[in-house]
Image: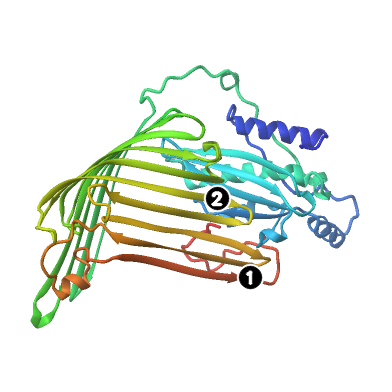
Amino acid sequence: MIPCGRVRAAVAVVVAVVMANAVPMAAKAQTTPPPPAAGAASAGAAAATDTTQSFAVKTFLDCRADGCDFDFLRDQVRWVNWVRDRLFADVLLLVTTLETGSGGTEYTIAAIGGERYRGRADTAIVVTLPNDADDVIRRSLARTFSLLLAPYAAKTPLAARMNLAYSAPTAEQASPKSTKDPWNFWVYRASANGFANGEKQSEFLNLFFNLSANRVTAAWKINTNANLGYDQSRFDLGDDGTFLNLQRSYGVDALLVKSVTDHFSLGASGSAQYSDFFNQRLNAQLSLSAEYNIFPYKEFTRRQLTTSYSVGLASFRYKEETLFGRIAETRPVHNGSVNWNAQQPWGNVNLSVFGSQFLHDPGLYNVGLGGNIGLRIAKGLSINVGGNFSRVNDQLYLRRGKLSDNQIIARQQALATNFRYFGNLGVSYTFGSIFNTIVNPRFGGSRGGDSF
């Protein structure tokens, strides 16, 4: 419950206006002290300031998204005490993100009370455009962080040193006219990138192109994509000549999704791909899908538990004859998965169980599990463990014949296997001062501010 009082009520009004995206505004909280009384000693004023700051709200920011420039936040929002661990915090700022239909980002910011504010939680949303400058994004986040933290700071001695500013909308902004989207929610994007490097006995070239057209509304989601990848590496082996490794891939894919309820959706997808690595001139697939989310989709940024199933046809045309003596084939296939994703004050978890199978032969399948778990076990101590393992028995694309040693080492084509795995484990322990407020950019080079 938002506290009563003139300052707190004003903060609540401004927060509501921000979340409704109804009008532009600029709000700031500052700790500039009032002018000292005549004859007051500088030392006494400094001591008073230090004493007041010691009562500031201890705040921990949990944000893994672009835009959370922590050095900038520490410099701009100085009226809280930033701490290095959530277990020391009075307030946890938990930031999760989703990509918007236009390619921008929706930041959901939850201010969760801890210690003396336990049981309180407030939420705000910031939406940025795909071409917004980094400075625009970080200032929007800093302003919203300030609005969420202001009610907590209002209960501390710092309240007497804070001011709240509000930029009233113009008459035109207060009564906006209905607008028509000339693009009908379609967003188009084209990108190209590449790199080249080398030395006397080796050289590498990588090129990638991508085109996409997407339309996202509450009722429908349409994603289309075309891509081309080119990787070339050359090695001078001396008397053994030159080895050239060439990897090309290109294709198109499309996805159509219909929102049925707050928990259920239906979809259809199709794709056509070329791949040197998988010995495929053509890999064309069409499928129908269904997905059910235990939690409402609107809680997607914080938690989801989904189960999905799809069934369709896969048609293959191979570059060279396969181990099974085929140059082309068309097979029915189905696949399913269960996914659990959560980002909570105690950490984050992403786990999935998945499987696919060719229906003409139940023995041709691929099943596995994988994910990542990050836990904050105690003050200063965190652990991260992740990986995946899959049982593989569906490599219809394997080329007949033996690969050379150089082809195997360079991973020029997929190799026969009946399993795949990957794992990682990390432990971090931090101790010492709990405060993380000071910014010192000296000898920072051209690296700029770190993102937290």
Marks 1 and 2, how far apart at CA: 24 Å
Task: Count up the numbered dots.
Answer: 2
Q: Residue at x 22, y 48 (%)?
A: 360
Instruction: Answer with the quarter of the image where residue 51 lies.
Output: bottom right
On the image, numbered disc 1 is attached to which residue? 430
Which one is in front in this view, the residue at disc 1 or the one at disc 2?
2
On the image, numbered disc 2 is attached to which residue? 342
Q: Please rate how many residues cluster around mark 1, counting C-alpha atoms within 10 Å: few if below 14, some from 14 to 19, many from 20.
A: few
Nearest to the observer: residue 110 or residue 171 = 110
Instruction: Answer with the quarter of the image where residue 240 lies.
Output: bottom left
Q: Secondary structure at mark 1?
A: loop
**Above or below, comparing residue 374 to residue 183 in the picture:** below
Q: Is residue 205 visible?
A: yes
Q: What x and y, as percent, mark residue 345?
A: 63, 53
Instruction: Answer with the quarter of the image where residue 147 lies.
Output: top right
Q: What x and y, as percent, mark residue 388?
A: 41, 62
Most extreme residue toward the right, as rendered?
39
Q: Secondary structure at mark 2?
A: strand
Q: Is residue 213 visible?
A: no
Q: How is the image coloured?
A: rainbow
Q: Quadrant of the C terminus?
A: bottom right
Nearest to the observer: residue 187 or residue 279 = 279
Q: What x and y, as percent, mark residue 374?
A: 55, 61
Q: Residue at x 51, y 17 (%)?
A: 177
Q: Which amino acid does the dot numbered 2 rest on?
A: Ala
**Above or below, comparing residue 413 to residue 7 in the picture:** below
Q: Please rate how many residues cluster around mark 2, counting C-alpha atoms within 10 Å: few if below 14, some from 14 to 19, many from 20.
A: some
Q: Which amino acid does the dot numbered 1 rest on?
A: Thr
**Above or below, comparing residue 392 to residue 96 in the picture:** below
Q: Residue at x 34, y 47 (%)?
A: 335
Q: Quadrant of the N terminus?
A: top right
Mark earlier in primary sequence (1, 2)? 2
